Image (spheres, rainbow, N blue to C red):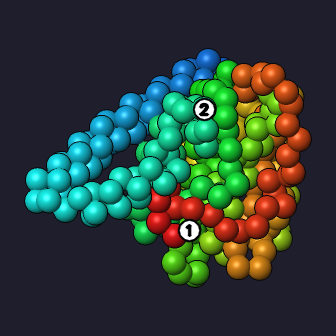
Amino acid sequence: MLVVGDRVLVVTAQPVRRGERNLGHVLTLRDRTELDELARERSALRALSDALRAQAHEYTNRLHTLAGLLDTGAAVEARDYLRELAAAPLATEGRDGARLADPYLRGLLAAKAATASEHGVALRLDEDSHLPRRLTEPLDVVSVVGNLLDNAVKAAESGERRPAWVELSVLAEGGTLHVAVLDSGDGVAEQDAERLFRSGFTTRAAEDRSGHGLGLTLARQLVRRHGGELRLALARGDGHGAVFVARLPGVLEQPADDLLVPDPADRPVTGELLGGER
C-alpha cells in the first residue's frame, strides 16, 4: 500500500520470464481510496458505539454504588461520591460548560482510555483543554486524533518511563481545532524525525511491518484536506517523549465570537486522567 498525492494505492509487482529470459515486471495499481475512507468511518463509528456501551455499563455500576450508599445510610459518602463523579472531565457532557461538547470525541477518548489502561498506560486530558462546540467533520477528526493516540500509547508502553502516560490537549479557536498529543515514551530518534510521515515508514521490527507505516501519512492527508497541518513539534523533551500537534481549520461549529488561544504545543506537561484521577 502506498499513499500517492491524495490517493491510497495497492501496488502489486509480478515478475515476467520466458524460459531463462527475464522480461521484467508487471505492476498492477489498484485505487482503494474510497474503500479506505469507508474503513476509517466504520472504525470511528465502531469506537463510538463501543464507548457508548462501556459508558452505559459504567454508569449502571455507579448508580448501583450510589444506591447502596444511600440504602446503608452513608449520606456523606454518597455526596462525596457524586462530587467525584461531577469533577470527572467527561462527566459534564451536553452542558454549556462542558470541556468536550462533541459526543464523537468523548466517545473516542472513553474507548482509547480503556484500551490504554489495558496496556498499562494512563490517558489523561490536559487541564486547560476546552471544546465548547461540536465538530462539523467528526469522522475526519476522530481518525486523526485516534491515530495520534494509538501511536502515543505504543510509544509510552515501550518506553522506559514509569508510570506510562499519554496526554491529549484540545483547544478551539473560532472554527479551528488545535490538537496536541505527547507521551512518556523515549521520543523519536533524530534519524527518524524526517521520515515519520513518509508512506510505508514504520519503526516496527521487520517481521511486524506488514500493513503498517500509513497511519501518520493518512492522518496528515486528512488534515491537509481541511487546509491544516500535522507535524512533529518536538522529538523529545524534559520528562516526556514526542509531541505531535495538528491544526484543523473549519471543523468546528462557528462561535458567535472568536477566541484567541495559545499554541497547545507550548502548554505544560500536566493534566488530568480521563478517569478523574491524578
Amino acid at the residue labelled 1: Trp
Which element is circle 2 on? loop
The furthest residue to the left:
72
Name the residue rendered at 71%, 79% in the picture: 239
- Which mark identifies residue 131? none
Instruction: Please identify the quadrant where the N terminus is shown.
Output: top right
Residue at mark 2: 96
Crowding near pointer 1: few (<14 within 10 Å), some, many (20+)? Answer: many
Circle 2/circle 1 CB separation < 8 Å: no
Residue 45 visible? The answer is: yes
Query: Residue 138 at x, y = what percent?
Result: 61, 27
Question: Gap between marks 2 and 1, in whole Å?
Answer: 29 Å
Amino acid at the residue labelled 2: Asp
- Is 84 positioned to the left or the right of 240 in the image? left
40 or 86: nearer the eye?
A: 86
- Which mark identifies residue 165? 1
Residue 199 visible? The answer is: no
Counting residues from the start of the chain, the first of labels 2 and 1 encountered is: 2
Between marks 2 and 1 in the image, the one whose residue lies nearer the viewer: 2
